[in-house]
Image (tube, rainbow, N blue to C red):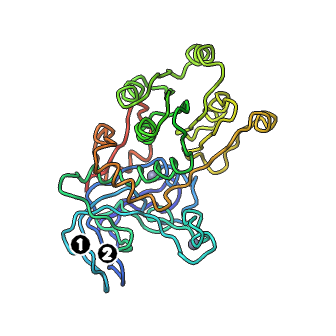
């Protein structure tokens, strides 16, 4: 079968590799749509924990192509999406509900071969059936939405909290929609792209700020007390340091964007102590795939406008090489 293989950092190729035959309890999915994620780009650049060679791709949808021994819930032809998480189930973290911190953490497309291929093999327990009313393009958004749901579980928004979010890309937009439904009284969004800010305003942001010095300074005047919730969805260290300057008293900060793994930021420990700050991380997915499916299936979260374009597996190599268009939301691969 055809697959995109990253053989080493900055070396991606389309290759013919063996069909992944499903083992007991596994299914093999004929892939239809794959979302390209910032993490895939980090893997391409050697900035993530992945081994090489690897087939990236962890946001996907498709059709069941073959089922392994003992699989009863799925048959060939079922339309599906799947949680890429691979938790061992037996380490202290898995046994205490923190599977996303599993001592042997793995995920399709991150630590084992993923979905940028014609077929992908997945544990049947990870698979969710999708209705005919949900397109394959939408279903490839369940995985990023599952990361958003985990982030919301970490944040624990209180009704009336004020929030500011940096980075209105595809992930930021899903966070914006979810925050808007979760009780924040004010939701300010900062980005460098006017088009992304326009989308944010349509989907629940109460105010937008173009990331320029003058606009940022004007917001400080408008809102000198800072915000209750500050979210970074950019993963850019300089933006994170800027975001932290918007922390109010008793504020919570959420690191949602993935930075390069050797990135550093400065945090003022006096303010951390003096203002009762809470600093939160949010790592991938933790039993949040099904709730994410429900958010999208009900129409509560609208991911359709977040798909900027579809490209082929072959075109994906040039996309990984960049440069990226800052006005673009999610780019998906269509198999
Ligand atoms: Zn991702
Ligand atoms: Zn574990």
Q: Position of residue 24 (x, y in %)?
A: 36, 84
Q: Is residue 59 left or right of residue 62?
A: right
Per the image, label 1 sits on a secondary structure element best described as strand
Residue at the spot 31% in from the left edge and 75% down from the top edge: 27
In front of the other: 110 or 268: 268
Please tell me how crowded label 2 is: few (under 14), some (14-19), or many (20+) other residues with Cα within 10 Å: many
Q: Is residue 7 left or right of residue 129?
A: right
Q: Position of residue 117 (x, y in %)?
A: 33, 63
Residue that carries the numbered disc 2 in the rendered image: 27
| Labels 1 and 2: the sequence-earlier one | 2
Residue that carries the numbered disc 1 in the rendered image: 65
Looking at the rendered image, the quarter that the N terminus falls into is: bottom left
Residue at the spot 36% in from the left edge and 31% down from the top edge: 203
Per the image, label 2 sits on a secondary structure element best described as strand
Q: Quadrant of residue 181?
A: top left
Q: Badges 1 and 2: C-beta atoms under 8 Å apart?
A: yes
């Amino acid at each position: 079968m055809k697959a995109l293989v990253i053989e080493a950092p900055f070396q991606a190729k389309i290759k013919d590799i063996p069909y992944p035959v499903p083992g007991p309890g596994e299914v093999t999915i004929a892939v239809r749509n794959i979302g390209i994620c910032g993490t895939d780009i980090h893997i391409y650049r050697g900035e993530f924990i992945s081994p090489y060679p690897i087939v990236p791709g962890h946001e996907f949808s498709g059709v069941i192509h073959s089922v392994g021994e003992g699989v009863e819930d799925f048959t060939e032809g079922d339309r599906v999406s799947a949680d890429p998480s691979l938790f061992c189930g037996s380490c202290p973290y898995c046994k205490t509900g923190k599977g996303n911190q599993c001592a042997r953490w793995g995920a399709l497309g991150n630590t084992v071969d993923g979905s940028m291929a014609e077929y992908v093999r997945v544990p049947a327990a990870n698979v969710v059936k999708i209705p005919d009313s949900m397109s394959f393009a939408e279903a490839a958004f369940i995985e990023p939405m599952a990361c958003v749901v985990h982030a919301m579980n970490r944040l624990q928004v209180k009704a009336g909290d004020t929030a500011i979010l940096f980075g209105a890309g595809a992930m930021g937009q899903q966070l914006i929609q979810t925050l808007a439904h979760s009780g924040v009284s004010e939701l300010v969004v900062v980005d460098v792209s006017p088009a992304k800010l326009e989308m944010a305003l349509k989907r629940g942001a109460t105010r937008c700020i173009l990331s320029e010095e003058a606009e940022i300074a004007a917001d400080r005047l408008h809102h000198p007390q800072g915000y209750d919730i500050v979210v970074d969805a950019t993963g850019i260290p300089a933006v994170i340091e800027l975001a932290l300057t918007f922390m109010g008293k008793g504020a919570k900060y959420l690191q949602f964007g993935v930075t390069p793994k050797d990135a550093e930021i400065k945090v003022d420990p006096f303010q951390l102590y003096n203002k009762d700050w809470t600093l939160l991380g949010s790592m991938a997915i933790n039993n949040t795939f099904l709730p994410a499916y429900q958010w999208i299936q009900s129409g509560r979260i609208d991911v359709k406008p977040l798909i900027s374009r579809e490209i082929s597996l072959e075109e994906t190599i040039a996309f990984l090489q960049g440069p990226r268009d800052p006005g673009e939301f999610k780019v998906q691969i269509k198999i």
